[in-house]
Image (cartoon, rainbow, N blue to C red):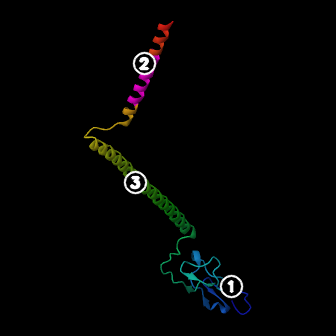
Amino acid sequence: MGYDCSETCPPGTYGEGCERKCSGNCANNETCHKVDGFCPGGCHNGFQGNRCSEEIDIGVNDFTKPCTDQGDNVGGLTAGLIISLLINVGLCFTVLYFIRKKENNKRNSQASYEVSDSVGSQRSSSGGHLENHAYEDLNVIQARDALQVYRNLALNDTNTNTV
């Protein structure tokens, strides 16, 4: 107080002759510095500047929460996005699996129809009886083998009669 600053101003005032009043917006309800009026611990939420006399338009932001709380929200958002991505990838693979399974069933069904259709056409051309070429070939082979056995027996008989 005074021109030589030999005395201090009472709480809540500052400057030459202690004529200026503190803003009252210092953090933790502290009083401003007695010489320059600055708030030593910062400002209440919603105020800024050295003397905490400038009001901040808060709008949609909530400056009453510490920044660490906002960081937790970012972690939760990131985890949610990752989980959502994994679920979507799983759904895509499931859909692809069922599409391919359906295509395979169509191919198998179509192949089965073609086989039964070709067998049916063989039956219809033979008067309702299935022509089985494998049995005919087997009968020819058996007849040929039987003839060979018969010839061998006949040769053995003639060889034994001449001796």
Of badges 1 and 2, the one in the foreground is 2
Residue 159 image position (x, y, % from top left): 49, 11
Judge whether 21 appears above or below 117 on screen: below
Q: Nearer the viewer, residue 90 or 138?
A: 138
Q: Which mark is residue 150?
A: 2
Front of the two marks 2 and 3: 2
| Closer-to-camera residue (83/88) | 88
Left or right: 45 as drawn, with respect to 128: right
Residue 47 place in picture, x, y as percent: 56, 82
Q: Residues within 10 Å of mark 1 (few under 14, many from 20)?
A: some
Tell me the SS state at disc 1. Answer: loop
* Residue at numbered disc 1: 8
Callout 2: 10 Å neighbours few (<14), some, many (20+)? few
Q: Which label was assigned to residue 103?
A: 3
Q: Which residues are magenta?
A: 138-153
Contact flag, marks 3 and 1 (Cβ < 8 Å): no
First in sequence: mark 1 vs mark 2: 1
Say what amino acid the circle numbered 1 marks. Thr
| In the rendered image, the vertical position of residue 120 relative to residue 81, given as above or below | above
Residue type highlighted by circle 2: Tyr
Image point 38% across, 53% down: which residue?
102
Q: Main secondary structure of the magenta part?
A: helix
Front-most of residues 84 and 7? 84
Hey, what amino acid is under mark 3?
Answer: Glu
In reply to whether residue 156 is colored magenta, the answer given is no
Secondary element type, mark 2: helix
